[in-house]
Image: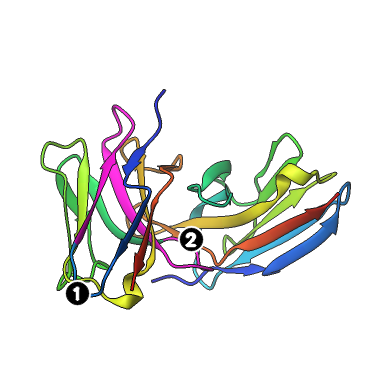
Amino acid sequence: GQQLNQSPQSMFIQEGEDVSMICTSSSIFNTWLWYKQEPGEGPVLLIALYKAGELTSNGRLTAQFGITRKDSFLNISASIPSDVGIYFCAGQLLVTGNQFYFGTGTSLTVIP
Amino acid sequence: EAGVAQSPRYKIIEKRQSVAFWCNPISGHATLYWYQQILGQGPKLLIQFQNNGVVDDSQLPKDRFSAERLKGVDSTLKIQPAKLEDSAVYLCASSLAGGSYGYTFGSGTRLTVV
């Protein structure tokens, strides 16, 4: 399967700080999704990106589809305690089918 | 709208036993997916259905895993016999045909094989 690497693996931040994370791959994707997963629950879709260079926001979250189509970025501004969770990127390949491959995840802890 | 329903939420079995998981997708969603999520990893696709047909089962360990979606609605995933390394959360997801707008996941079934 495809390898999507997320960085950083984990983050511990103070409430109110901004957060940035990245998802990279050696393959070209035509769609990027960002999900958040809380303990004991399935992932919940946050943002979807469909064009290279696209910048999309959802409240305090902003994600970008990388120009190379091999990466994507997620930013969270002014973090709050409920932002705690694991953030996964998911990419859909340009060529084959509609399966989404998931990244390794970034675990976010927000310290009040 | 009602979400993706999965049951049971938790299951503990001994190795070599069999187990089955059930999923009821969002009404009208033609595509159904089963993912395996091992602790500390991202979800990995096991099988994808379009209505009641299999689209992709290339990563399903077919010697022990099977899945069906007989009437194009709910689905069952079975493991027989289970191994220790099958301990994971099994997530079901559904989407409108194509899935490019993302999937909706259920809460998952946490399987522990001892």
Disc 1 marks which amino acid? Arg
Q: Which residue is mark 2?
A: A102
Neighbour class for label 2 at 10 Å: few (<14), some, many (≥20)?
many
What's the magenta region? B19-43
On screen, residue A99 versus residue B53, left or right, reads: right
> Where A15 falls versus A60 (above or below)?
below
On screen, residue A96 versus residue B66, left or right, reads: right
Rounded to the nearest angstrom, the CA distance separating label 2 from label 1 is 29 Å
The extreme left residue here reads B70
Locate residue B56, reporting x and y percent.
Answer: 24, 58
| Residue lying at 73% horizontally and 34% vertically, measured from the top left | A59
> Where A58 falls versus B63 (above or below)?
above
Quadrant where the N terminus of chain B sits is top left
On screen, residue B31 versus residue A14, left or right, reads: left
Q: Which residue is mark 1?
A: B16
| Residue lying at 39% horizontally and 26% vertically, measured from the top left | B2
| Residue lying at 44% horizontally and 67% vertically, measured from the top left | B38
Locate residue A9, reporting x and y percent.
Answer: 67, 69
